[in-house]
Amino acid sequence: MSEIIYQATDLTGSKRVEFLNEARRDRARLRATDGTSLVMLPERTLATLETIAKWGGAYIKLSTLLRRKTGVPNTSELGELAWLRPFDREDMEEFLTELQDTIVAAEADGDTAILDECVRAWKATARQLSDPLRRSVLLNAHHSDDYVPAESPDAMNGPEARTGG
């Protein structure tokens, strides 16, 4: 960020283009007429910072809950993270580790794509675990005799199906 601090009157003069170019590159500082310091930056940068701050806060909240309590936090304790309720404590701790890693990566990249994908994947898994049948398929032990060879659709319909007649 440049050391230049623009004045409100600069926006009506020739420095307006310089101010906008600096804001496009990274950010530009402006001192309002009442003395307030303002910063202009690309909207994408602001969105990235807001997303990182949101998930950073969620990380702190879940970390605190898991540190202070044995077992799994209840729905009201989880609040906006209540979608995590299908997970056991070990899964929540795994989510916490992955969330921390992706927050760091998103901040380093200046892009929240990796963070967005992490949360999307965990939410999809939580939805699957919310369904009792899917949960049993995903988490219960399976044995080889639980499975049978699948036949091709043609074989199941007989030779007429293959020849059309």
Image: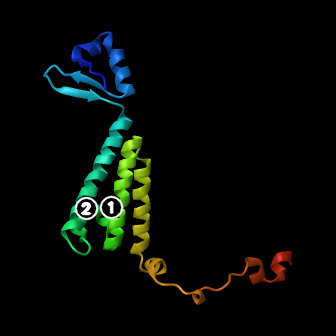
Q: Where's the N terminus, which quadrant?
A: top left
Instruction: Kindly identify the amino acid type of the residue bearing the numbered disc 1.
Output: Leu
The residue most toward the top is 14
Mark nearer the N terminus (2 vs 1): 2
SS type, badge 1: helix
Q: Quadrant of residue 144?
A: bottom right
Tags 2 and 1 touching, CB below 8 Å: yes
Q: Is residue 123 left or right of residue 155?
A: left
The disc label shown at residue 6, or none? none
Q: Residue at x 16, y 26 (%)?
A: 36
Q: What is the x, y in percent for residue 62?
A: 26, 62
Q: Quadrant of the C terminus?
A: bottom right
Residue 130 drawn at (x, y percent): 39, 73
Q: How many marks?
A: 2
Q: Position of residue 126 (x, y in %)?
A: 39, 68
| Crowding at mark 2 (Cα within 10 Å: few <14, some 14-19, many 20+) | some
Q: Quick one: SS at disc 2?
A: helix
Residue 63 is labelled as 2
- Distance (Cα) linking label 2 and label 1: 7 Å
Give the x, y percent position of residue 48.
36, 42
Please, what is the three-letter code of the amino acid marked with disc 2? Ser
For image coordinates 40% across by 52% down, the residue present is 115
18 or 110, nearer to the observer: 110
Left or right: 132 as drawn, with respect to 41: right
> Are there few (<14), some (14-19), or many (20+) residues within 10 Å of tag 1?
some
Q: Residue shown at 43%/50% (left/top)?
A: 114
Q: Residue at x 35, y 60 (%)?
A: 97
Point out the residue furthest to the left here: 34
